Image (cartoon, grey):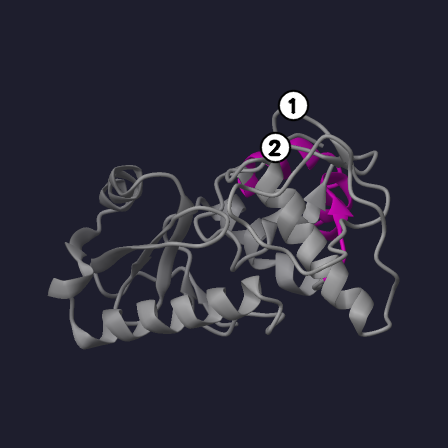
């Protein structure tokens, strides 16, 4: 996946894409995806505006922005059914702070599909071994959720800590990946964390499980 933080186009097309996890707010320039987040369109627009982007509705956008949004939808839908494991849509990280850019851009290479790592492990990989809490804050500000997989980072004891889309969404994403990873023979699916269910309306593959060792936590995102 190509990621960039170099400002280019200053207009972003905004759309809402329904998913089994709930609606995702998407925004794209003619060159790249700049936003994929949970919440309301108004919240997404406010975030884009603070970053200096002018926003337009998808139907009024240029062909390039519409093409990026269409490709993002296609890849999200395929990922959420287990039909694909990674995203190739170009990503622009101008909405992230410098440390958040560094942190979320490292996710794909550091923690591949079907795996998890802790905040402390990611901090160490970034040569910031004392910055586990800062890593948690940076992931909480991830402007491109799901596409850049901050859901794969868990607490120090394997706890399933806070996530922008809610713990049930995080549990489902991890379980989806674990299940399909298990189908390849790379590892066996493990038991679901107790007390968590998938978001309403979400259909999971039969036998869907979460990664081994995860436990539910209702606390904020933290190491």
Callout 2 secondary element: loop
Q: Is residue 100 above or below residue 4?
A: above
Q: Position of residue 189 (x, y in %)?
A: 84, 57
Image location (x, y in percent) of residue 15: 27, 56
Q: Is residue 67 left or right of residue 139?
A: left
Q: Which residues are magenta?
A: 114-139
Q: How many marks?
A: 2
Q: Quadrant of residue 31?
A: bottom left
At label 2, counting other C-alpha atoms closer than 10 Å, the crowd grade (few under 14, some 14-19, many 20 or more) is many
The location of residue 170, given as percent across then percent down, is 62, 44
**Quadrant of the image occupied by residue 11:** bottom left
Q: Residue furthest left?
A: 60
Tag 1 residue: 219
C-alpha distance separating marks 1 and 2: 6 Å
Q: Which residue sits at x=56%, y=66%?
A: 79
Q: Is residue 126 magenta?
A: yes
What's the residue at 62%, 58% (across, down)? Answer: 106
Res. 205 image quadrant? bottom right
Residue that appears at 51% across and 47% down: 201
Are discs 1 and 2 less than 8 Å apart at CB? Answer: yes
Q: Compare marks 1 and 2 and give the one earlier in the sequence.
A: 2
Q: Is residue 192 left or right of residue 98?
A: right
85 magenta-colored: no
* Residue occupied by mark 2: 162
Quadrant of the image containing the C terminus: top right
Q: Residue at x 22, y 60 (%)?
A: 13
């Amino acid at each position: 996946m190509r990621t960039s933080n170099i400002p280019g186009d200053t207009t972003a097309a905004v759309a809402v894409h329904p998913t089994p996890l709930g609606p995702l707010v998407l925004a794209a320039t003619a060159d790249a995806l700049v936003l994929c987040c949970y919440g309301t369109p108004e919240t997404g627009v406010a975030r884009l505006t603070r970053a200096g982007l002018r926003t337009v509705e998808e139907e009024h956008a240029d062909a390039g922005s519409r093409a990026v949004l269409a490709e993002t939808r296609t890849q999200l839908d395929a990922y959420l059914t287990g039909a694909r494991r990674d995203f190739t849509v170009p990503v622009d990280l101008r909405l992230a702070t410098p440390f958040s850019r560094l942190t979320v851009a490292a996710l794909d290479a550091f923690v591949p599909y079907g795996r998890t790592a802790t905040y402390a492990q990611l901090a160490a990989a970034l040569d910031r071994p004392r910055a586990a809490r800062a890593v948690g804050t940076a992931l909480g500000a991830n402007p491109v959720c799901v596409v850049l997989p901050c859901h794969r980072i868990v607490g120090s004891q394997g706890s399933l800590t806070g996530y922008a889309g809610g713990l049930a969404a995080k549990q489902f994403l991890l379980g989806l990946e674990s299940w399909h990873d298990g189908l390849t023979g790379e590892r066996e699916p493990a038991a679901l964390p107790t007390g968590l269910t998938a978001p309403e309306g979400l259909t999971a593959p039969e036998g869907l499980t979460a990664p081994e060792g995860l436990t539910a936590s209702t606390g904020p995102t933290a190491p």
